[in-house]
Amino acid sequence: MTDTPTRDDAWALLTEFTDNPSLIKHALGVEAAMRAYARSFGEDEEVWGIIGLIHYFDYQQNPTEATHLHVGTGILRDRGWPEEWIETAASHADYMGVPRDTRVKKTLFAVDELSGFLTACALVRPDTAIAEVKVKSVKKKLKDKAFARGVNRDDVTRGAEELGVDFDQHIAFVRDAMATIADQLELPPRSS
Ligand SMILES: [Fe+2]
C-alpha cells in the first residue's frame, strides 16, 4: 500500500477476514468510541477510528493468544500499513508486550472491553436504548461476576486509570459514542 489507508480500506480489511456479526459490531463500537475520544482530545479522528475498526480484524480466524494479533500484525506489515498504527492495534493485548505509551494506545485499551460490556448491558434491557443505560447500573453489573463473564473487569478499570479519565465519565462517554450508531450496532431503539 503506497497511500495512507482510508476508512474504506479498513472496512475492506475487516470484512475480508471477519463475517461474524458480533465481531463486526464490536469493531464498529470501538471505532465510534475512538472517534469520539479523538475529537475530544483534538487528535486525528480518522486515524483513531481506523485503528479501532481494525484492532480485532484477525480474531475470527486467529482466536488464541498464540495467533491473534501475531498473524494480524504480519498481514498489516505485508500490506504496508503504517507501523505506528500496527503497534497501536497490537498494544491493546498485554501479551503482545507493546507498551501503551501514547494516548491513542491508552484509549484503545480503555474503550475495548468497556464497549463490549456496554453492549451486553444494552442487550439485557431490550426496552431501554443504550443512551439511557445508567452509569450506576453499569457499575453494578461490573461487580456481578456472572454477568457478561467474558469481559475482563480488571482491563475495564485499568484502562480508565491508564488513560487518566474519571471512571463514571468514561462509562458515560463511551456509552454516548456507541449510542450515535445504535442502529448499526443493532442495539435496542429508544423507548420513547
Ligand atoms: Fe476488541
Image (cartoon, helix red, strand yellow):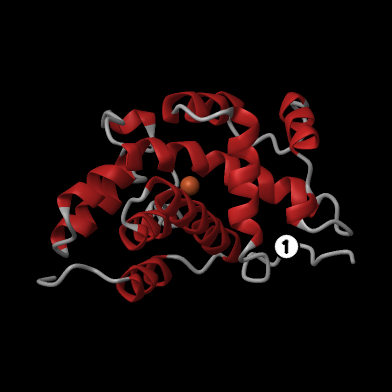
Is the residue 88 above or below the residue 164 in the image?
A: below
Q: Residue at x 55, y 64 (%)?
A: 20
In the displayed structure image, the side of residue 37 where residue 171 appears, left or right:
right
Picture quarter with the C terminus:
bottom right
Estimate the x, y position of residue 40 in percent, counting from the top left.
45, 49
Q: Residue at x 67, y 71 (%)?
A: 183
Q: Residue at x 50, y 69 (%)?
A: 19
User: Label 1: few (<14), some or many (≥20) within 10 Å?
Assistant: many
Picture quarter with the N terminus:
bottom left
Estimate the x, y position of residue 67 in percent, counting from the top left.
34, 44
The residue to which callout 1 is attached is 187
> In front here: 139 or 74?
139
Q: Is residue 66 visible?
A: no
Q: Is residue 2 visible?
A: yes
In the displayed structure image, the side of residue 168 where residue 10 appears, left or right:
left
In the displayed structure image, the side of residue 125 where residue 160 appears, left or right:
left
